[in-house]
Amino acid sequence: MRKPYQFALPVVGLSAFLLLGQVAGCSKPADQSGMGTAPAPSSTADQTSQANAGSRLGDLSAFRAIATDVAGIVDEGDLPAAKARIKDLELAWDSAEAGLKPRAADDWHALDKAIDKALAALRANAPTQTDCKAAMTDLLKAFDSLKGKS
Amino acid sequence: MKASSAARPAGWLNKVPEIALSFWIVKIMSTTVGETGADFLAINAGWGQGITCTVMAALLAIALFTQLHTRRYTPWIYWLTVVLVSVVGTQITDLLTDGLGISLYLSTFVFAAILAAIFVVWYRLEHTLSIHDIATPRREFFYWAAILCTFALGTAAGDLATEALGLGFTWGAISFGALIGITCAAWRLGGNTVLTFWIAYILTRPFGAALGDLLTQAKIYGGLGFGALSTSALFLSVIVLLVGIAQLTLDGDEYAQANE
């Protein structure tokens, strides 16, 4: 029989390799241009991101911008267009989960819940202007309530 | 079909693979592929969590049924089942946490207790917990029940580490990688094979998730920014390659034995 215990060596080796690549990647100043948040989700980086963007989750402006956009479309009364646009928020928010959540899990959950409610309002079988507007207002409030915390 | 018990050919009627390097590589990568795949269907394809969960559970039922009715280890069926168990195990935890609001402390504890109970009953009935010789339907039932449970437990424990300790994927990969290293060292120093196997099986779930996040997350979050799609495509290729090799090797052995 082959030795079953050799699995850990490559596992540890692979993570060490990836880590090195990661450290090297982070030290490049060019990488930080994007949204201007801290490069790593470690506790020290959290403090940096707080200083930079005034929210424990870091810079959320890109997400808030989509939400503002959706709220504007709802105000115009074009609910199908708002429904289509909010998917961008859902996709962006979901793909950033692993990066954002460890920074402040409670804040992340609060915002996640508000996004879920907005999605539910816009995706209801018969969405109403009132519900969608209320959900979007709450969502924007949720974004703003996190800004104060740091 | 041969029925001689004395000279049973290697792998004959055993329903599970040997635990070698490729086993762990495929196991770890299947975690990422399973999670990305389910996310893709739920969000990008717009199926929503409800439909995705139902479809995945149905696929798992079919795969498991097929796996339980094969006569011997068939790599592609076995690993397809593992990938689907990985997806469904993750979804069970997510459903409990996000859908029912159950705390991760509670779910981690409950899954650990259920897993322990499975092992106790398994041992009482079979007098072994061997993971090398899964050759009866009852053993195989216990095997898959335990595997489903380790994925749910691994998800809950991994999420708990993220939420309670604020452990990001970088430190997650390091911590769980180190724990796997310790488990391996314990095994080499004479630790119990079955126990260390299951501990490693649980730990590779959050390790695989952290590793996947490290590759897929954007650079501004400290990831390598490869994107979920390319990472999954890469991992899936490696899985298909390794499982394909296992399948062809096995088929080759069978052919050779048939011609002896």
Image (spheres, coloured by chain):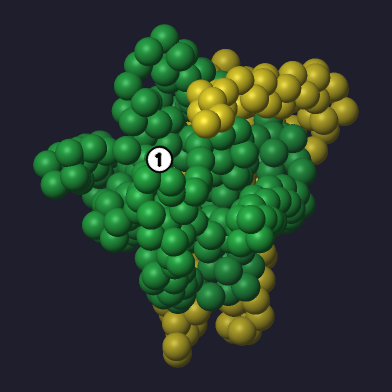
Chain colours: A yellow, B green
Q: In this rendering, is residue B129 above or below A115?
A: above
Q: Chain of mark 1?
A: B
A116, B30: nearer the viewer: B30
- Identity of the amino acid at label 1? His
Indicate the position of residue B73 as horizontal and vertical percent values: 49, 56
Residue at image position (32%, 21%) is B192
Callout 1: 10 Å neighbours few (<14), some, many (20+)?
Answer: some
Indicate the position of residue A18 as horizontal and vertical percent values: 71, 26
B32, B97: nearer the viewer: B32
Residue at image position (35%, 16%) is B191
Residue B90 is left or right of residue B228, and the answer is left
Indicate the position of residue A10 as horizontal and vertical percent values: 64, 25
Residue at image position (38%, 60%) is B3
Q: In this rendering, is residue B145 above or below B23?
A: below
Residue B187 is left or right of residue A69, and the answer is left
Count of numbered circles in the view: 1
Secondary structure type for disc 1: loop
Instruction: Give the farthest residue toward the right.
Output: A30
Residue for badge 1: B132
- Hey, which quadrant is residue B103 in on the image? top left
Indicate the position of residue B121 as horizontal and vertical percent values: 14, 45
Residue at image position (46%, 14%) is B188
